[in-house]
Image: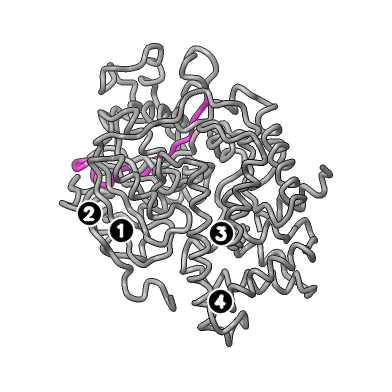
Amino acid sequence: MPIRWIRWLVLGVITAATFATVPTGPASADPVDDIPGGLESFYHQQLDWGSCNDAVLDGAGAQCAGVVVPLDYNRPDSRTLTVAISRLPATDPARRHGVMLSNPGGPGGPGLGMMVDLRDRLTPEVRARYDLIGMDPRGIGRSDPVNCALPLPTMLFSAGFDAFGFARDTALAAALAASCVAPDPEKARQITTRNTARDMDIIRSAFGERRLNYYGGSYGTYLGAVYSQMFPQRTDRMVLDSAMDPDRYWIGTYQDMGAVNEAGLDDWANWAARRDADYHFGSSGPQVRAFVEDMIRRAATHPVVGNGYLIDEHTVPMMLLALLSNPQKNADLAEVVRLVADGVSGLPVDLEQLKTKISGGVPMNASGMAAVLCGDRAAPRDPAWYRRNIESVRATQPVFGAFANNITACAFWPDPIEEITAVHNSAPALILQATGDTRTPYQQGLALHEDLTGSRMVTLADTRVHGVLRADLSRCVNETVNTYFRDGTLPDADITCRPDPGSLPGH
């Protein structure tokens, strides 16, 4: 595969105060006595805090440290990794409840700076009680990252319309897998959710805490659920925002994204139709959808290549996907559609502007994402399996079915080192889910709610959004989350919230 061609494809897809003193170890004994054999030195380690060497984190008053963990928990005397963490200390040590660890999702998303953003969604009473802990999970960001030799920003593509396009994606997926695994097979296979959960427990102990509080979004909900299954006696207050169904993780999760993104596209098309004077895509929802589908077909026959970018039938659906997860990005999506439509029509197009509009919708990298997903659960090996699934949904999912069912690097990855985690426990948790979520569909949150029998669920009704806890979206959601983190009090029953008036302008 020519390097120049790969470069085009790669870049085209992108275009889809005073610190409180807290216990940091070493402790004389772990707060929970059942330390797995051979891991004592990891659980009792001293953390060395210092500058984060990051303008945002340092400006927020954070400190950073490295937590040493085994690469392979079955061989703790062998290789190690260093997991990078950050800390924003509790503002009132006298009322401190403990540490709140976080994960932004992906998988593949670095989380070292996540708590700087999350802090603004928490009340002063909550910030007083917790050290807010960010983490780059193993193999990601500053935590001894997996670096695939093929520098793709994502492992996810749309298969296009024909056998040739599918064959191209199959070859690219195989090349990505080889480029990730071959440099260090032992390391690549140990970047898993279960190992990250084990790392989280070592982090808990390094702070001298008996239990761990947690906020996770998207994939981070799955990580939190796995932690609660593996370490139920060490789980405290847990908020899981935009949840995954553990039984459908991860292949089923992506398959479920096909239908909900088609619905999301219809929702956006109706919005754009009301603004036909501005965008000229059509004056009805069906007309706007027809414009988008025709644009993708034209991208297949008239791709745009230039300055290292590729716009074609494989990349355009991913650009749409990147912005459909938040109606506050409706105008940005309309600008992307206009840029792409102009480009495939032969008009000049500002590719840097296109990249700027959509790059925030693809926050994870291919290396970490592939390592975690493929290391967690084996995928079918036969390319024909994926092709059959794609063809079976083309009529009902004309834009996103070829993405949701496409082959990935996992079809060519080594077998996982251990079985997938079956989640079913009574750990308390607060699950947040929007009815129109285009990344983790609503039924996935319902399924996790059933698996976590001690949980309560907050439904954000009539909203197409991924990531429910936002400073400017729903006071009802925010008050429920902050009450739980402040007092440890779950709602008496599941509740339904709605967006605040004016929080979704023009929606």
The crowding category of the residue bearing disc 3, from other C-alpha atoms within 10 Å (few below 14, some 14 to 19, many at least 20), is many
Real-space Cα distance between discs 2 and 1? 8 Å
Pointers 3 and 1 in contact (CB under 8 A)?
A: no
In terms of secondary structure, where does tag 2 sit?
Answer: loop
Please name which of the two marks, 2 or 3, marks the residue nearer to the observer: 2
The crowding category of the residue bearing disc 4, from other C-alpha atoms within 10 Å (few below 14, some 14 to 19, many at least 20), is some
Report the magenta residues as a range: 81-95
**Residue annotated with mark 2:** 494
Residue found at x 41% / y 27%? 198
Residue 401 x, y percent position in the rendering: 58, 55
Pointers 2 and 1 in contact (CB under 8 A)?
A: yes
In terms of secondary structure, where does tag 3 sit?
Answer: helix
Q: Is residue 88 left or right of residue 363?
A: left
**Residue annotated with mark 1:** 459
**Residue annotated with mark 4:** 286
Please name which of the two marks, 4 or 2, marks the residue nearer to the observer: 4
Real-space Cα distance between discs 1 and 4? 29 Å
**Residue annotated with mark 3:** 322
Residue found at x 61% / y 33%? 146
Residue 93 x, y percent position in the rendering: 23, 41
Please name which of the two marks, 1 or 4, marks the residue nearer to the observer: 4
Real-space Cα distance between discs 3 and 4? 21 Å
Pointers 2 and 3 in contact (CB under 8 A)?
A: no
**78 inside magenta stretch:** no
What kind of residue is marked 3? Answer: Ala
Q: Quadrant of residue 170?
A: top right
Of the image marks 2 and 3, the number of the one nearer the N terminus = 3
